[in-house]
Image (cartoon, coloured by chain):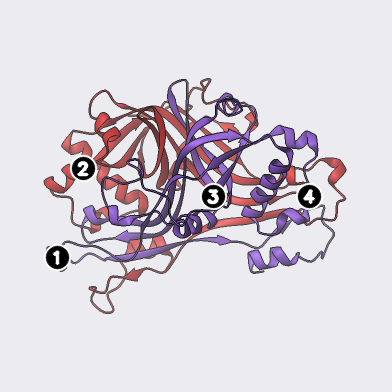
Chain colours: A red, B purple
């Protein structure tokens, strides 16, 4: 599915406050999604909301979501589809203002609304599984045993076409009321980053086995 | 509200798969919650799920959630309460198995179901706002100007009493099918950590102003 240059805003994707933080262009939305692999997927079960952490991969304007075959709501997605809200958030910093009120978080988030469907086509499932693995560690899918037909059947993959989607970004420094500028409290931003550590080989790995190139690039080791 | 030693499992909090990863003791649940400040809160709006990133603070067996006063669902919470699912997830590592199927994530998550209510009592609101600030940076609430009555009224705080709640933890190394043990693929765990960077003072701060103790402890600077 080809990507639009911009996702059309809808009543649900226009925030009631801080509208200047919202973005709808595909470049921004996709960049935030591509900077991670874990989202929180919300759906309704027995009339009540459920939110589960879920791995995802973006392929063009489609999100593939990794699910358990066991849960009832995901079985629903096999038929009429499952209404979901998928939200991915990265924290970039803690904004400490002189006033408690103006404390904030620098973050980038994407919220996507839509109906998710179970992916049934074997070839699309294979591509989605590879994309899920490569989203976590780029290049990894080529360096593992592919799923057997039986393994593939045990994994539910949902497909959500991105259409009603928006990004929200808060960045930069402290926004303070002018009359608070001279208060004696420390003010500024504490950066937050996610760090990839040195890979710890499985005990069954041959001693001294070199790291594959893609993993050296990924970890900076 | 005092904490139970263990939260009672319910049909919703017993997973359909990987039950050995679930935990219900308050110590485990609270420790995961206390190791962060951002959750994803799901609720239903117009019959469809919505998931928003939200700051939270735990006080005993209560979660306080920071919301915008503008949004309609949060206004609902002023009256009959808002059914929510609050999920907080920390990623600890990427588990690369020799088979694609056994790739996994080391993580700790908490899922809490319940009805959230708007906090109206001024004293409870004040304590909750302080807790929200101190959950992000311990000790910070004492080093900023407290919210005025007007500011406080602009901030919606929801209260969710923890009752139907569970933790889920995946840790350790690769779980591999024995017949895959000799495959030539790199296998192991890539640790993921969240790192607090050096604080960047607001341009309005006096040159050479020292970091407050609580911030030096927090950032390790």
Badge 3 and badge 1 both on one subunit: yes
The residues tagged by marks 3 and 4 sit, at their Cα atoms, a distance apart of 30 Å
Of all chains, the one bearing label 4 is A
Task: Return the disc, 4 or 2, that comes first in the chain's sequence.
Answer: 4
Decide if residue A27 is in sight here: no
Disc 4 versus disc 2: nearer the observer: 4
* Residue drawn at (12%, 45%) of the image: A149
Question: Dot 3 lies on which element?
Answer: loop
Question: Dot 1 lies on which element?
Answer: helix
Residue to which mark 4 is pinned:
A98
Q: Residue furthest bottom?
A: A207
Query: Can you say whether B81 is above or below B88 in the image?
Result: above
The residues tagged by marks 2 and 3 sit, at their Cα atoms, a distance apart of 44 Å
The residues tagged by marks 4 and 2 sit, at their Cα atoms, a distance apart of 52 Å
The residues tagged by marks 1 and 4 sit, at their Cα atoms, a distance apart of 58 Å
Of all chains, the one bearing label 2 is A
| Disc 2 to disc 1: CB gap under 8 Å | no
| Disc 3 to disc 1: CB gap under 8 Å | no
Crowd class of label 3 (few under 14; some 14 to 19; many from 20; radius 10 Å): some
Residue to which mark 1 is pinned:
B178
* Residue drawn at (63%, 46%) of the image: A105
Task: Return the disc, 3 or 1, that comes first in the chain's sequence.
Answer: 3
Residue to which mark 2 is pinned:
A126
* Residue drawn at (20%, 62%) of the image: B176
Disc 2 versus disc 1: nearer the observer: 1
Badge 1 and badge 4 both on one subunit: no
Q: Is residue B208 left or right of residue A215?
A: right
Nearest the eye: B138 or B123? B123
| Res B61 label | 3
């Amino acid at each position: 599915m080809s990507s639009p240059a911009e996702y059309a805003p809808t009543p649900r994707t226009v925030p009631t406050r801080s509208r200047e933080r919202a973005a709808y262009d595909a470049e921004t939305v996709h960049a935030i999604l591509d900077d991670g692999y874990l989202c929180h997927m919300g759906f309704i079960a027995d009339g009540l909301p459920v939110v589960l952490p879920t791995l995802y991969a973006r392929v063009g304007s489609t999100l593939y979501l990794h699910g358990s075959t066991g849960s009832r709501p995901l079985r629903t997605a096999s038929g009429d589809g499952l209404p979901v809200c998928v939200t991915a958030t990265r924290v970039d910093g803690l904004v400490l203002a002189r006033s408690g009120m103006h404390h904030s978080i620098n973050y980038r988030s994407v919220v996507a609304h839509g109906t998710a469907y179970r992916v049934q086509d074997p070839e699309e499932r294979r591509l989605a599984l590879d994309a899920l693995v490569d989203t976590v560690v780029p290049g990894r899918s080529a360096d593992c045993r592919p799923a057997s037909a039986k393994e593939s059947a045990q994994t539910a993959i949902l497909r959500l076409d991105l259409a009603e989607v928006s990004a929200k970004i808060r960045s930069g420094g402290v926004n303070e009321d002018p009359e608070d500028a001279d208060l004696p409290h420390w003010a500024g931003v504490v950066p937050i980053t996610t760090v990839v550590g040195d890979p710890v080989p499985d005990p069954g790995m041959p001693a001294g086995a070199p790291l594959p190139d893609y993993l050296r690039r990924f970890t900076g080791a």
